Amino acid sequence: MERARSGKSQSAMEFMTTYGWMMLVLAAVVSILYYLGYFNPNAYSPRLAPGGCQVTRPAGSVAELQGSCNNELPQFVGYFNSTSQYSWVTVDRVVLPNGQSSGTITAWINPQTVQGDGTYAGIVRIDGESCPGHGLLLSLQGSSGRPSMATWCNDYVPSGGPTVNYNEWNFVAVTVHGTTATLYVNGQSESGPLSSGDPMSLVSGVCAQNLSIGSTDCPGRMFYGMIADVQVYNTSLSSTDMNSIYMEGIGGPPIDLNYLVGWWPLNGNANDYSGNGYNGNSVVVAYRSSWVNGYTPP
């Protein structure tokens, strides 16, 4: 009787040993597939081809959207690898008007890691003429995960407020109107007065380009991760407008074409689809099709 029980126990142990390893391997495979986004329903959603939606500005006519502009997810997004000396998009000739006191930048970002020194990583910077080397800057404080901004010799660096999630997609934006700045993160906002000073140390006269994506300086304090759907406006959009852009999701087109300065979806290239022709130059920027992991539509 004891021998029979012993035989059954041994058989059970052999079964567990054989199939236990199989279960561990299966669990590891499922985990990898989940990490790569194969179980994300967005991975199977219709994808917008590069340039599938764009703004046209016929001479003497009002600007309008053309193509498939139904908030479809883009095929690609821009991947910025800050471990390289240069990983950014540069654009010439894009300068906000002299004396301009309002503007807006919006973008979708997926930061992969906190910057090594815990300071700032540039998301979008556009030069102005009223203060050399300054215009409108949207950056990320690596140590806190809070967006911050600078504009026309003044800055706004919040001590509190909403923060981004690393290794996930976030909607971030900034508007400035006069001496007041408002930062937006995933539908939340924080406003405050601009202060004098320049903690982000923007440098003038160093680079030929007037707009950069993925860096603050020339280059410097570079972004590590993915960026998509960058929009720049020559006006301070309202909170209602900002909520509309956020709710459109990562494939949303611009909403105010009259004040639209540039639109860089980063969907496979650095072209400007605002109709203004501010096409960019990609420097060590990869365009990824497997980007949906970590993205949840608003």
Image: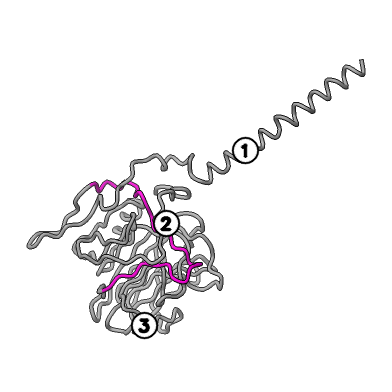
From the viewer's perspective, tell me whether residue 37 is left or right of residue 69.
right
Query: Which residue is labeled 3 in the image?
Result: 206
70 and 102: which is toward the camera? 70
Above or below — where is 203 with respect to 175? below
Sooner in the amino-acid sequence: mark 1 or mark 2: 1
Question: Are the two marked residues, 1 and 3, in contact with CB atoms closer than 8 angstroms?
Answer: no
* Neighbours of disc 3 within 10 Å: few (<14), some (14-19), many (20+): few
Q: Which mark is residue 186?
A: 2
Per the rendered image, the range of residues in magenta is 68-92
Amino acid under disc 1: Ala
Amino acid under disc 3: Val
Name which residue lies at 35% across and 70% down: 212
* Neighbours of disc 1 within 10 Å: few (<14), some (14-19), many (20+): few
Amino acid under disc 2: Asn
Sooner in the amino-acid sequence: mark 3 or mark 2: 2
Above or below — where is 115 with respect to 57? below
| Element type where label 3 sits in the image | loop
The label nearer to you, 3 versus 2, is 3
What is the spatial separation of the Cα atoms under label 1 and label 2, in whole angstroms?
Answer: 33 Å
Rendered image quadrant of residue 96: bottom left
Q: Residue reaching furthest right? A: 2
* Neighbours of disc 2 within 10 Å: few (<14), some (14-19), many (20+): some
Q: Which mark is residue 27?
A: 1
